[in-house]
Image (cartoon, rainbow, N blue to C red):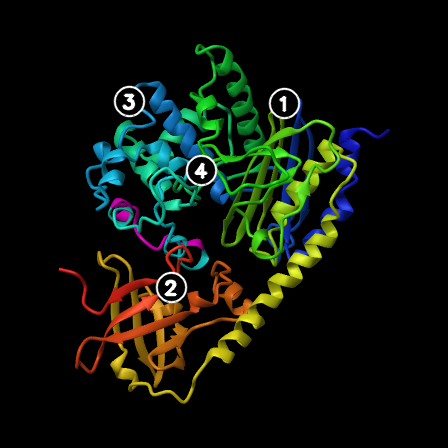
């Protein structure tokens, strides 16, 4: 009998093949449909060495799926009239002191939750190796206060984890409790989410499992429907219609009627392309159109997560109370959680013109692997080894950002010039002369994985440019182009600011 549950179960061999292609050791997934869990499955290993299989209670860091929890926490505080969505963040957190007057006086929590502040993301300064925070949380407000203004306030969508760091601080300041304690008390426990996962921070720090996430998304969709009809509901979740409504348009997609960001969620009308905040757009020329051949457009609300070494995805179809959750345990050669989530989604949609996800998994994995030697070839092509450089000691020093809380430590180790971030010399990288006073630290894909680094395939990211000041012998500045939205790069200074 061709039931939806049977069609989902029959995907097993395809899922195994996509995991093999991508290099994903373990995956847990589940499907809620018409408010009932109709499918749960697990593949591979949660512990490869111990040959331990995952199940629906296996804990994974869900990365940016955490953002909806943060938005939901703020929704509760707004319901209790402890703040408003548009309350300027600086009025709650005076330490948030951005030099742009509009950002300082007008940017509300809704602007940061919807990624419409216009501030640079500086994503690669958010985490260090193996997903460890690069800065203590107490520095969040100060760091956010110096983020470059890339676009005019509220005019364009620009993904920014730091805004959710501010939301954490707002939650703690207004509730009087830690972010994790507040969410556990007001969301996790009331909803019966029993998994004993960590609640570290709201941009990417929730640890959860398939069982609890399906419970959460079911509750979100139920609260949305109830609260659109009545303000008096029994759900512990509040202001869900505001959270699930569009707040800023994303880059247009000609195949879709809507493509917007809500609060911790992305809205797309199907047929349309998905995967906006995942890794796969780096590995394919164009994301595929999901839902081709459907007679009636349908709204899909989704998000993805990526933090070394986890990838995750969640797709919702509110009209049928459907939620699809995929959790994986590897920063794979493509975003396997995204492809698997889309595969399950098209199985639920049962649209006639389905995507060949095995083929696109092969294409994206091959591109992902090929990008690293391609970067090395381009680097070598641009290299000018015969141009003059200074003695290594000239470059040695600790270079700080303009507010002095983030640094690049350049040092000599047995005659070899190396660098590390945040003075973590146990995680150092060899500097190779590139041209004049420029040095590169490009890794291979295998080295990147072994070092627990997020896969960045922008060559400029791996080039450091040193500058002297006047007639001084030693270098005084270092330029690092770590954010493509700030192409001129960021200047780090040998001497910390006073």
Image depth: mark 4 or mark 1 in front = 1
Asked whether, in this view, residue 454 is left or right of residue 367, the answer is left
Residue 82, label in figure: 3
Q: Earlier in the sequence, mark 4 or mark 1?
A: 4
How many angstroms separate mark 3 from mark 4 (CA)? 20 Å
Q: Secondary structure at mark 1?
A: helix
Q: Report the span colored magenta.
A: 131-141
Q: Please provide percent x and percent y for residue 439.
A: 38, 77
Task: Check disc 1 and report the residue beneath it.
Answer: 319
Does 327 appear above or below 174?
Answer: below
Which residue lies at the image location 43% right of the left edge and 45% below the top edge?
A: 159
Q: Earlier in the sequence, mark 3 or mark 1?
A: 3
Task: Check disc 2 and report the residue beneath it.
Answer: 481
Q: How many marks?
A: 4
Quarter of the view holding residue 389: bottom left
Q: Secondary structure at mark 3?
A: loop
Q: Earlier in the sequence, mark 1 or mark 2?
A: 1
Q: Is residue 133 magenta?
A: yes
Which residue lies at the image location 53% right of the left edge and 63% below the top edge?
A: 449
Does 427 appear above or below 415?
Answer: above
Quarter of the view holding residue 437: bottom left
């Amino acid at each position: 009998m061709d039931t939806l549950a049977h069609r989902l179960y029959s995907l097993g061999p395809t899922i195994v093949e996509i995991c093999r292609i991508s290099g994903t050791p373990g995956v847990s997934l589940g499907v809620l449909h018409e408010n009932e869990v109709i499918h749960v499955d697990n593949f591979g290993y949660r512990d490869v060495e111990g040959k331990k299989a995952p199940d629906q209670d296996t804990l994974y860091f869900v990365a940016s799926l955490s953002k909806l929890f943060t938005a939901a926490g703020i929704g509760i505080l707004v319901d209790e009239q402890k703040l408003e969505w548009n309350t300027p963040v600086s009025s709650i957190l005076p330490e948030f002191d951005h030099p742009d007057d509009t950002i300082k006086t007008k940017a509300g929590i809704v602007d940061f939750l919807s990624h419409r502040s216009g501030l640079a993301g500086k994503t690669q300064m958010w985490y260090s190796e193996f997903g460890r925070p690069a800065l203590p949380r107490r520095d969040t407000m100060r760091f956010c206060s110096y983020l470059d203004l890339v676009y005019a306030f509220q005019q364009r969508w620009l993904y920014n984890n730091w805004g959710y760091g501010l939301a954490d601080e707002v939650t703690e300041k207004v509730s009087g409790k830690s972010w994790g304690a507040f969410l556990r008390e007001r969301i996790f426990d009331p909803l019966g989410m029993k998994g004993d996962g960590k609640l570290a921070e709201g941009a990417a720090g929730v640890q959860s499992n398939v069982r609890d996430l399906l419970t959460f998304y079911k509750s979100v969709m139920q609260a949305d429907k109830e609260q659109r009809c009545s303000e008096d509901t029994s759900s512990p979740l509040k202001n869900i219609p505001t959270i699930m409504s569009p707040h800023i348009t994303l880059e247009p997609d000609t195949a879709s009627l809507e493509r917007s960001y809500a609060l911790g969620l992305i809205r797309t009308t199907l047929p349309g392309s998905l995967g906006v905040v995942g890794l796969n757009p780096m590995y394919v020329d164009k994301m595929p159109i999901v839902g081709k051949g459907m007679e009636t457009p349908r709204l899909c609300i989704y998000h993805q997560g990526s933090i070394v070494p986890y990838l995750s995805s969640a797709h919702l179809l509110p009209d049928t109370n459907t939620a699809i959750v995929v959790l994986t345990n590897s920063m794979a050669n493509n975003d396997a959680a995204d492809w698997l989530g889309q595969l399950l989604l098209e199985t639920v949609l049962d649209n006639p013109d389905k995507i060949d996800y095995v083929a696109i998994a092969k294409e994206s994995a091959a591109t992902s692997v090929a990008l690293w030697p391609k970067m090395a070839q381009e680097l070598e092509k641009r290299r000018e080894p015969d141009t003059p450089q200074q003695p290594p000691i000239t470059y040695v020093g600790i270079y700080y950002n303009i507010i002095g809380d983030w640094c690049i430590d350049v040092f000599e180790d047995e005659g070899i010039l190396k660098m590390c971030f945040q003075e973590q010399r146990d995680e150092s990288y060899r500097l190779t002369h590139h041209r004049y006073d420029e040095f590169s630290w490009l890794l291979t894909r295998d080295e990147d994985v072994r070092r627990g680094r997020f896969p960045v395939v922008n060559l400029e990211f791996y080039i450091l440019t040193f500058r002297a000041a006047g007639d001084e012998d030693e270098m005084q500045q270092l330029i690092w182009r770590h954010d493509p939205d700030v192409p001129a790069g960021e200047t780090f200074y040998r001497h910390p600011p006073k």
